[in-house]
Image (spheres, rainbow, N blue to C red):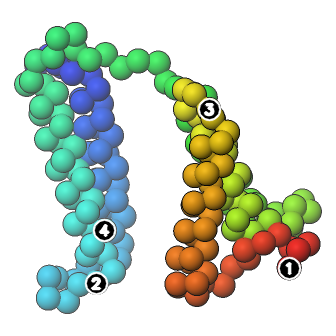
Amino acid sequence: MKIQSQKDFFSGLMFTAMGTAFAAGATSYHVGDAARMGPGYFPLLLGVLLAVLGLVAVAGALTVKTADGEPIGRAAWRPLLLIIGANVVFGILLGGLPSIGVPAMGLIIAIYALTLIAAMAGTSFALRPTLILATILAVGSYLVFIVGLKLQFQVWPTFIS
């Protein structure tokens, strides 16, 4: 068989591999049955569903013809590293790194840093809309997590509170 769409084929393989890994990992917990679900029941079902969807994508990639075979392009390293880096910076700013002397900066500062760094991963960067988005996210996160759910974590930097 010839691969008709490389993108669909490899994304289907990735979904199948991840679903199989999650389903296999879920079996280390008590699964139970539909009437008495254990902690492994839901992850097992999601893993199996993801693996089946991956197999459907692989089958489609082998049967549905595309014009150019949809080749996979080069990896977009800059956006990938910026998005991963934004999440790492968010975690460091939210909780701090006492081992190297970085204090916790709190939720608001961490959200602004996350939004600004992640926005640089796009093809165009505009500061004003990014700051507006960061403000909306910070206010919304404060209202949901601190006011609504009453979670106890730092909102402002340690030197302020």
- Identify which amino acid the numbered label 1 is placed on: Ser
In the rendered image, which residue does mark 1 sit on? 161
User: What is the spatial separation of the Cα atoms under label 4 and label 1, in whole angstroms?
Assistant: 40 Å
In the rendered image, which residue does mark 4 sit on? 43
Graded by Cα atoms within 10 Å as few (under 14), some (14 to 19) or many (20 or more), the crowding at tag 1 reads few
Residue 69 in the image, given as x and y percentages of width and height: 22, 14
Q: Dot 2: what SS? A: loop
Residue closer to the observer: 144 or 32: 144
User: What is the spatial separation of the Cα atoms under label 3 and label 1, in whole angstroms?
Assistant: 33 Å
- Identify which amino acid the numbered label 2 is placed on: Gly
Residue positioned 70% across, 65% down in the render:
108
| Left or right: 27 in relation to 32 | right
- Identify which amino acid the numbered label 4 is placed on: Pro
For the question of whether residue 27 can be seen, the reply is no
Q: Which numbered disc, 1 or 2, marks the residue closer to the eye? A: 1
Is residue 93 positioned above or below 113 on the image?
below
Residue closer to the observer: 113 or 20: 113
